[in-house]
Image: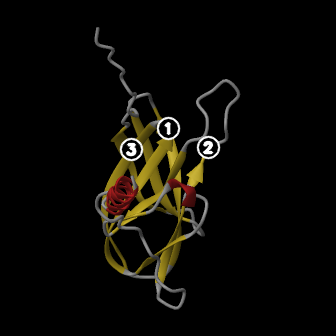
Amino acid sequence: MKFLVVLFTLLFLLGCSSTGRNANLYSPPLETVPSVVFWGEDSPGKFLGKGHEKVYLCRVDGAFQNSFTFDKPTRVELGEREISICYNEGANHAEAPIKATFDRKAEYQIKLGEHSWTEVNFSVVDKNTGELVIGPISVPKVAGDIPLLIFAQ
């Protein structure tokens, strides 16, 4: 009996340690490093409507950042970067990859534009001047996965 308990414990621990690839999470540069700052945006919730929609910087040079950061500043080091702007609303999402070169310190606001059931529009403006920096960009929305249960007889 003790052998089975030890065996199941080892199998459990081995299963927990091999859950797939490592997450590539974004780590912003130190505040002393010259960088640009991105701010996300959300729409207010609507009574009997669709709910909160968020646009935010979700990837920097391939590293992932989750949607909980949409209302916090995201620092990106100056230079040539590959960034992605993401849209989330419930199970719907969209992502727009962008190659850009940032050569001076600035603060940018990501703005949610008009959108339909199938696509979303957003742009990036200079937070201090309101000048359009990137966009407007249109990307298709992707509906969330809905689990399908099949019952065999």
Are there few (<14), some (14-19), or many (20+) residues within 10 Å of tag 1?
few
Task: Indicate the secondary structure of the residue bearing disc 3.
Answer: strand
Spatial separation of the CA atoms under disc 3 and disc 2 = 16 Å
Spatial separation of the CA atoms under disc 3 and disc 1 = 14 Å
Residue extending farthest to the right is 47
Are there few (<14), some (14-19), or many (20+) residues within 10 Å of tag 2?
few
Q: Position of residue 77 (x, y in %)?
A: 41, 80
Q: In this image, 30 relative to 2: left or right?
A: right
Residue extending farthest to the bottom is 32
The residue drawn where x is 43% and y is 28% is 117
Q: Are marks 3 and 1 in contact (CB under 8 Å)?
A: no
Q: In this image, 83 relative to 113: left or right?
A: left
Q: Splitting the image into 4 quarters, where does residue 21 fall?
A: bottom left
Q: Is residue 32 above or below residue 130?
A: below
Please state which of the two labelled residues, at mark 1 or mark 2, is closer to the viewer.
Answer: 2
Spatial separation of the CA atoms under disc 1 and disc 2 = 11 Å
Are there few (<14), some (14-19), or many (20+) residues within 10 Å of tag 3?
many
The residue drawn where x is 36% and y is 64% is 23
Q: Position of residue 97 (x, y in %)?
A: 31, 56
Q: Splitting the image into 4 quarters, where does residue 63 fall?
A: bottom left
Residue occupied by mark 1: 114
Q: Position of residue 89 (x, y in %)?
A: 51, 39
Q: Amino acid at mark 1?
A: Glu
Residue occupied by mark 3: 94
Quarter in which the C terminus is drawn: top left
Q: Nearer the viewer, residue 17 or 104?
A: 17
Residue occupied by mark 2: 43
Earlier-in-chain disc, 3 versus 1: 3
Q: Amino acid at mark 2?
A: Ser
Q: Nearer the viewer, residue 140 or 151?
A: 151
The residue drawn where x is 34% and y is 42% is 139
Q: Amino acid at mark 3?
A: Ala
